[in-house]
Image (tube, helix red, strand yellow):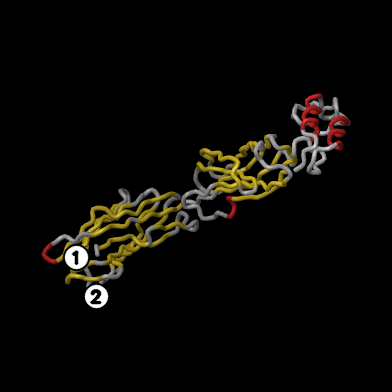
Amino acid sequence: MIAELKVEPPEIRDPSLVPCSSFDVNITINNVKSLKTCAFNITYNSEVIIESGFQISPVLGQVPSKKILLDDEAGFIWVELTYPESITTYSPVTIMTVMFHVKAMGISPINLTDTWMTGVYGRPIVHTVQHGIFIGLICDIAVTEHSVKLKFAYAGWAVEINVTVRNEGTTTETFYVVAYYDGNPIDTITVNDLSSGSETTITFVWETENVAPCHNYTISAEAKALPYEINLENNFLTDGKVKINIMGDVNGDSRVDMQDLNAVCNAFGAFPGHPRWNKNADLDQNKRMNLTDMGIATMNFGKPC
């Protein structure tokens, strides 16, 4: 087994760790045989965290002599520990605890660099190193609203879906948003550089040409999770349905018959605002009831679901 030198825990992320709060990390060894001297450099981002104290722990009754050089401006703690007697342990043991003070929101690596372990007579001990990281920011994006322009559409129509997303975290974020119908993806749109506290509305276009008609489809939207995002409950929103009908089924009874042809005929010549206007009869969506609508309805006459 190879000796190990680790930062524990390897990852610290907690929305409560705001400026003026503090946290501890342990430096541990494991699977070491006849260890006499252990040295390492703990480096960190001094713009985000600074050392506020440390404690050197006895190991198996051995209290080490120590050399320590600390520079908070540069962001490092150099440590050399030499034990009176050699140490052998095959389970994790803490050799040092470092207390950090949070200065600002952000991310700081807590890395172990320039490490070495030596045994009796200065013989080097091969070892692996595990670094740590402090994540002192809140990553939280949310889908706050979505709306569908059409609650009723014919197979082949384009349906617009407006999705509003909000950055409820503390840093500017770039992320993906996906719209779905009955769990099937419609499209993915990238939201770029949305600042903290801001929201934006994006528009998806659902092309329904190959969608089975005579069905109410559930519309939903998802903001894809960010790295280190903790609150995922607000990333997904289901709200609203769209019924897709057979082209020409004006009354929505799942077939194109004389009632539908009569509805198109009755609206002939109408336009939005006209007393005989029927938006469901405007089959070509040109906001004018004309012979094209009559032709489409006639062409689909007799079609059932």
The tag on residue 58 is none
Rendered image quadrant of residue 202: top right
Is the residue marked by circle 2 packed among few (<14), some (14-19), or many (20+) residues within 10 Å?
A: few
* Quarter of the rendering occupied by the N terminus: bottom left
Q: Secondary structure at mark 1?
A: strand
Q: Nearer the viewer, residue 199 or 186?
A: 186
Which residue in the structure is indicated by mark 2? 61
Q: Quadrant of residue 264?
A: top right
- Left or right of 234? Residue 247 is right
Q: Quadrant of residue 255?
A: top right
Q: How many marks?
A: 2
Question: Given the image, on which type of amino acid does mark 2 rest?
Answer: Gly
Ranked by sequence position, the earlier of labels 2 and 1 is 2
Which amino acid, by three-letter code, is at mark 1?
Answer: Thr
Q: Nearer the viewer, residue 271 or 266?
A: 266
Q: Return the mark for residue 82.
A: 1
The residue under the point 77% across, 38% down is: 303
Residue in the foreground of this view, choosing between 137 and 214: 214
| Front-most of residues 123 and 212 | 212
Residue 157 in percent (x, y) is at 70, 34
Q: Secondary structure under badge 2?
A: loop
Residue 22 to residue 206: above or below: below
Which residue is painted at 23% across and 59% down in the image?
127
Q: CA distance from mark 2 to mark 1?
A: 13 Å
Residue drawn at x 78%, y 43% as measured from the top left: 254
| x and y percentages locating residue 80 in the rendered image | 21, 60
